[in-house]
Amino acid sequence: MATVSCPECAAELTLVEGTEVGELIVCSDCGVDLEVTSLQPAAVQLAPREEEDWGE
Amino acid sequence: MKTTVSILGGSGYGGGELLRLLLAHPCVEVKQVTSRSHLGEYVYQVHPNLRKRTQLKFSDPAVLEPVDILFLAQPHGQAQHHIEEYTQLSPKIIDLSADFRLKDPEVYEQWYGEKHSAPKWLSKFVYGLPELHRVELATATYVSGVGCNATASNLALLPLIKADLLDTSSPIYIEIKVGSSESGAEGNVGSHHAERANVIRTFSAFGHRHTAEVIQEMGVDNVSLTMTAVDLVRGALATAHARVKQGASNKDLWKAYRAVANENPFLRVAKEQRGIYRVPEPKILAGTNYADLGFELDESNGHVVAMCAIDNLMKGASGSAVQCMNLMMGWDETLGLEFIGLHPI
């Protein structure tokens, strides 16, 4: 299984078997959404996220 | 055979919390709990959460019997006058008060406004925060307590200090929001419900005594603590404003926080992208020994906001004391401290 580094927090993440390009995964450390951009070699980028103000 | 323990001064909030933990601890037996003001009363009459959990009554401090570990949970300023007597009663002492936290008698006098009564004892105590002194605690005989506000501050700064990411030439300002249980069970005019409810009250802009513990334990001089009372019973949230060294990035900070969380069972990183609890909050820590840590870094100018939430009576006092006991006795340091908190609460 391929590993990638989270672009947000540098946590090492493992791409499970069957992961596809374009799939969204979540970093287990910082919780950021990541888009898988390549499998050979494995690569991810930050997925766009909606701004929230928590109702404040 | 269980390890015997007693609590000297068990009618306050710190003593009550300690008793709650010790009664549930698998390796200890609580022999005596003392209180002059509640002498002869059942302890559950003062600490109602212990009803049906113990039939102990408050004893006179004068009739304390020898035990394996003696906990001191008296008001500040008492233990230092009687430490020689206490050491005759027990080979190991854990003092929750502020009497033996500071190493330097002159520093003690500077912050507490009076000379220490037993200065030669200061160097015999290990500062009782396991995240800073785990190795020393394993062989310690005498352990001090920790200041709750100092603990929130020290743990907020710990990942940055340990990874040498902090620019210590720049000032560090720490704002601490605190719950009412910090002021103790005695009460005062300011803690009267009509005056304390719904407040956000900055009661100490700077010069708080716990600052001395941050200076001592973090090795930083240019630090200031500001205390603000908020409408909570339990809980403290430290928010530190500081500057990181040039070039330090978010990833560097993540690495530093991840490292301390991996090394310490009660430290957690609370920095989430989803959900409601994205940053450290004391609310969900009530009754637990966890300290939740978080940070935000402005990479453009190096301004870091480091946060730490705790339950002041647990990680900030009795929980850390029990964790210290576990380490002193060679037990798993999480024993008796497994409660993970409530949600919702």
Image: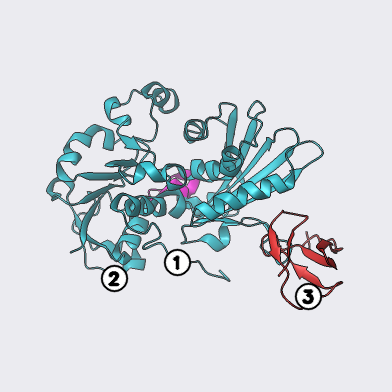
Return the x and y of residue B63 as percentages of the image width and height: 12, 49
Q: Amino acid at mark 2?
A: Arg
Q: What residue occupies the far front of the structure in this picture?
A: A40
Who comes first in sequence, dot 2 or dot 1? 2
At mark 3, the secondary structure is loop
Asked if the residue under mark 2 is in contact with the one under mark 3, i.e. CB atoms within 8 Å, the reply is no
For residue B1, what is the image quadrant?
bottom left
Which residue has dot 2 on it? B53
Which chain wears cyan?
B
Q: Amino acid at mark 1?
A: Phe
What whole-number distance in Å separates the C-alpha atoms at marks 2 and 1?
Answer: 17 Å
Chain ID for label 3?
A
At mark 1, the secondary structure is loop
Label 2 Cα crowd, 10 Å radius (few <14 / some 14-19 / many 20+): few
Label 3 Cα crowd, 10 Å radius (few <14 / some 14-19 / many 20+): some
Question: Residues at marks 3 and 2, common chain?
Answer: no
For residue B226, what is the image quadrant?
top right
In magenta segment, residue B190: yes
What whole-number distance in Å separates the C-alpha atoms at marks 1 and 3?
Answer: 37 Å
Chain ID for label 1?
B
Query: Can you say whether B137 is above or below B207 in the image?
Result: below
Which chain wears red?
A
- Residue at the image position 52 percent from the left and 69 percent from the top: B342
Q: Is residue B4 left or right of residue B151?
A: left
Q: Amino acid at mark 3?
A: Thr
Q: In this picture, which residue range is highlighted in magenta? A: B182-192
In magenta segment, residue B91: no
Residue B213, labelled with which disc? none
